[in-house]
Amino acid sequence: MVRIPAPTSPRPASVATEPRLFRIQEVAGETGLTPRSIRYYEELGLLQPAARSSGDYRLYDPSDLERLRFIRGLRDDAGFSLAEIGLLLEDEAARVRDAERFRAAGDLEERKAILRGLLDRVDRQVSTLEAKAARLRTMIDEADGRRSHLRAHLAELEGGGPAHDAEAAAR
C-alpha cells in the first residue's frame, strides 16, 4: 500500500542538527515542478514550507520534497485532480490525529467513535479509488475498441477481407 506522506506544518527555522533546507528553485529542480506550481499547492493548502529565511524566502525540507513528489505522482501518473489529492492528504492528516486520539482515549465509546470515523474516511477513499478505476477501465475499453477497429482496417488493407463487414458481424 502506498503511504501518503505526513502532513507538513510550519516548523521553526533550521538549526545545525536539522536536515538541510531548500529554496523553491532547488525544490522545483528536484521535483520537476515549477515554482509557480509549488506556490499554488501552498495556496491550496496541499503544502506548507518548512520555514522562511530572513529574506522571507520559502524553505523546504526533505519531507516537503517527498510530499511534492507524491502530489505530482497522483496528479500526473494517476490522474487525480488537486481537489481529490487534497482530500487524500486531509484524510491522512486526520488518520494521524485520530491514531493519537485513539491511543489517548480511555473511554470505550470514544474509541469506538474514533474507529467509526476512521472507517468512514477509508470508505470514502475506497469509493474515490473505485470511481477512478472505473473511469480508467472505461478508457481502456474504449482504446481497445479503437485498436480492434484499426486492426480490422489493417487486415483489410493486407488482403484479409473487408474491415467493416467483420465489425458489423461482431456487433
Image (tube, rainbow, N blue to C red):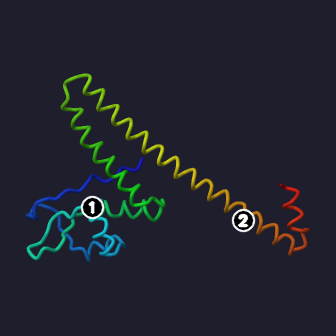
Instruction: State the SS at label 1.
Output: loop
In the drawing, does residue 151 fall left or right of residue 67?
A: right
* Residue visible at 84% across and 55% down in the picture: 170
Whole-percent x and y of residue 148?
76, 63
Three-letter code, disc 1: Leu
Q: Secondary structure at mark 2?
A: helix
Could you say where residue 87 lies in the image, as x and y percent from the top left? 36, 51
Vertical relation: 56 (above or below) 120: below
Callout 2, which amino acid?
Arg
* Up/down of 20 relative to 111, above or below: below
Residue at 47 percent across and 48 percent down: it is 128
Q: Which residue is mark 2?
A: 146
Query: Which residue is the site of mark 1?
Result: 47
Residue 142 position within the rendered picture, expressed as x and y whole percent measured from the top left: 67, 60
In the image, residue 2 lies at what x, y percent? 40, 50
Marks 2 and 1 sit apart, C-alpha to C-alpha, by 40 Å
